[in-house]
Image (cartoon, helix red, strand yellow):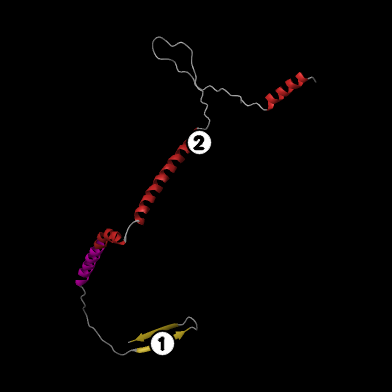
Amino acid sequence: MSDSEAAAEAKRIMDANFRTEQLVRHFPTSFRDDTELPAYGTTPPVHQDDRRIVPAWAAGIAVASIGVGAGVTGIGCGAWLVLQGLASVSLAGVLMVTLPFAGLAMAATAIGGAISRARFAVTKNVYEGPVTHKTEIHNNTTTRGMFFARTRNDIHN
């Protein structure tokens, strides 16, 4: 092989294997209809193929997940702000905030106690008939069991 043939072969190999520019594929990004439009009235519809990269359900899930992520981020920011505020609260501030609730609880307890005592103040027990009072008691006690003992007291009048 001569020097000129070797140089041509080397250039061909270098161009084939170490090409710096890449092939650019051209995809149509729009559709152009060159038919003449009618002078009057509406134009007829033109069919346009639907060539999406992802299916519609996948795009819907992606949008929903972005919305959920943004919502959770908002909740997290709100919780962070609340916890930052609670971290800087002093004991006096907490007591001043809870004082009205404690007062309402104390008033509700007092009103409930007064109502319950007012209910028990009225008695409607009426006893009729003879009353006998026996003072004799006969005690009969039996105990059974070793570890778990059971005691039974029978009191007879």
Q: What is the residue that sits farthest to the top in this orientation?
A: 39
Judge from the rendering whether residue 134 lies leftward or rightward of residue 4; answer left or right: left
Q: Secondary structure at mark 1?
A: strand
Query: With respect to residue 109, does 88 lie above or below?
Result: above
Q: Which residue is mark 1?
A: 141
Marking on residue 47: none
Q: Quadrant of residue 94?
A: bottom left
Residue positioned 74% across, 21% down in the render:
7
- Please rate how many residues cluster around mark 1, counting C-alpha atoms within 10 Å: few if below 14, some from 14 to 19, many from 20: few
Residue positioned 48% across, 38% down in the render:
62
Residue positioned 25% across, 59% down in the render:
100
Is the Cβ of the residue at disc 2 closer than 8 Å to that at disc 1?
no
Region of the chain picked out in magenta, as a range: 104-122
Q: Nearer the viewer, residue 147 or 16?
A: 16
Q: Nearer the viewer, residue 56 or 72?
A: 72
The quarter of the rendered structure image containing the C terminus is bottom left
How far separated are the C-alphas under marks 2 and 1? 81 Å
Query: With respect to residue 105, does 128 lie above or below?
Result: below
What's the magenta bit mostly, secondary-structure-wise?
helix
Q: Which residue is mark 2?
A: 58
